[in-house]
């Protein structure tokens, strides 16, 4: 499970001889894992070879978060129904 989002950024690679230095439409895509820590956005470069693993981890986090939110809603409903039946 990986908490965060995968984002794609485009930009030149930095090599003067690369076509991306001359033609902005040919900028390279890079993937990053983005998350918030202590109120600040953090980013971690994700190599192409590891992208599928990161995607699985982020998907697992989203599924976990949805299940936890549903559990919290059910708990709130139970507490409200018990509150109404107290003599």
Image: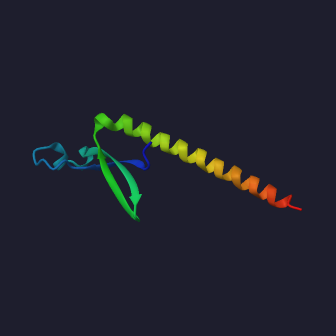
The answer to whether residue 31 is left or right of residue 16 is right
The answer to whether residue 75 is left or right of residue 30 is right
Q: Residue furthest right?
A: 87
Q: Residue furthest bottom?
A: 39
The percent coordinates of residue 18 (x first, y second) are: 14, 43
Q: Is residue 12 above or below residue 49?
A: below
**What residue is shown at x 43% (from left), y 40% (from top)?**
57
Q: How is the image coloured?
A: rainbow
Q: Is residue 31 visible?
A: yes
**What residue is shown at x 51% (from left), y 45% (from top)?**
62
Toward which corner of the image does residue 19 lie, by quadrant?
top left
The percent coordinates of residue 59 (x first, y second) are: 48, 40
The percent coordinates of residue 73 (x first, y second) are: 68, 52
The percent coordinates of residue 11 (x first, y second) are: 25, 50
Q: Between 27 and 86, which is closer to the camera in this rendering? A: 86
Q: What is the count of numbered marks?
A: 0
Toward which corner of the image does residue 36 lie, by quadrant?
bottom left
Q: Quadrant of the C terminus?
A: bottom right
Q: Is residue 22 visible?
A: no
Q: Quadrant of the N terminus?
A: top left
**What residue is shown at x 40% (from left), y 64% (from top)?**
38
**What residue is shown at x 80% (from left), y 60% (from top)?**
83
Q: Residue furthest left?
A: 17
Q: Between 31 and 11, which is closer to the camera in this rendering? A: 31
The answer to whether residue 73 is left or right of residue 6 is right
Q: Residue furthest front?
A: 87
Q: Is residue 48 above or below residue 43?
A: above
């Amino acid at each position: 499970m990986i908490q965060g989002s995968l984002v794609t950024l485009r930009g030149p690679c930095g090599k003067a001889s690369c076509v991306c230095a001359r033609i902005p439409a040919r900028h390279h895509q890079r993937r990053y894992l983005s998350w918030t820590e202590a109120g600040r956005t953090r980013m971690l470069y994700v190599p192409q070879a590891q992208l599928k693993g990161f995607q699985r981890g982020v998907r697992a986090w989203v599924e976990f978060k949805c299940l936890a939110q549903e559990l919290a809603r059910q708990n709130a409903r139970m507490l409200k129904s018990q509150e109404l039946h107290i003599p």
